[in-house]
Image (spheres, rainbow, N blue to C red):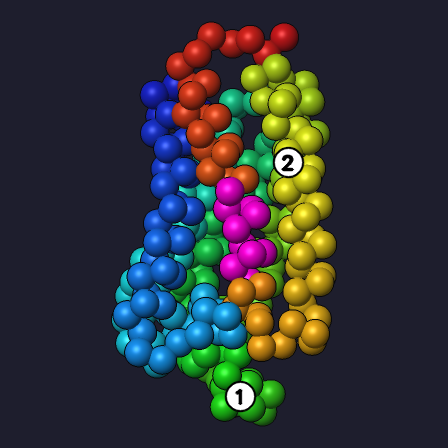
Amino acid sequence: MPTAGWRRVLGWCAVAGPVVFTAAWLVAGTVQDVYSPRREDISALAALDAQHAWIMIAGIVALGLSVVALGLGLVGAIDDGRSATVGAILLVVAGLMFVVAGVARDDCSSELRACKKRVDAGDVSWHHVVHDNVGIAVFLVLVAVPLVLAGAFRGDGRWRDLRRYSLASGGVTLVLLLVFGGEPFSGWNGLAERILVTIPLVWIAVLGTRLARIALAPDTSA
């Protein structure tokens, strides 16, 4: 179980990850000669044919490690028991999924017509398939984990005020995942993905900030 000092470090790492990830897609999109953030997804910036893929790869991996850090930091930090443990485990799983997604790169930009034809024909590498499937799975986990931790927050005064926010974060993420997965947003998938990913990333940063601030504070959970 992490000490109070380590919890603070892990909390601020959880804050840093979403910031680094966002900065990475902003910078990588800017230095890419031909790229549409409105149409193309973030993963395209780390694809095999991206000009500066290392920027986005580093951003995705940094995000994954920060989510793992949050999960580890929450172990024993919430006075609830089972729900808190499950939530921490789900965060670690989500973080590892992000790391896998960063390493298992797409072959090409999946939102472009030529790449879509390759995907539909099954003419893509195993790591392209892994990346896409892991991307779907990690969003599902990011829907579940705020809802699980919302239950854990109910019994701890240090976290209780984040319960409704966590419920809202999980619920909104689920709604956006269902809405943005439809064909009506074809041509705007890049913007839709950025809106979708921002909701859980802000939630992660908020939890990291709270973890860091309460790490050395007296226990007022009663």
User: 193 above or below 79?
Assistant: below
- Residue 52: x percent and y percent? 28, 71
Percent position of residue 113, x then y: 53, 88
Indicate the amino acid at tag 2: Ser
Residue range in magenta is 193-202
Q: Quadrant of residue 217?
A: top left
Q: Is residue 188 above or below residue 81?
A: below
Choose between 93 and 165: the one closer to the eye: 165
Q: Mark 1 packing: few (<14 Cα in 10 Å), some, or many (20+)?
A: few
The quadrant of the image that shows the C terminus is top right
171 relative position to 212: left or right: right
Marked residue nearer the N-terminal end (2 or 1):
1
Q: Is 222 part of what is drawn in magenta?
A: no
User: Three-letter amino acid code at disc 1?
Assistant: Arg
Quadrant of the image for the N terminus?
top left
Q: Quadrant of residue 153?
A: top right
**Secondary structure found at label 1:** helix
* Residue shown at 41% from the left, 31% from the top: 11
Q: Is residue 19 above or below residue 87?
A: below
User: Circle 1 sits on which residue?
Assistant: 113
Helix, strand or loop for disc 2: helix
Q: What is the C-alpha distance between the residues marked 2 and 1?
A: 37 Å
Label annotation for residue 80: none
Residue denoted by label 2: 166
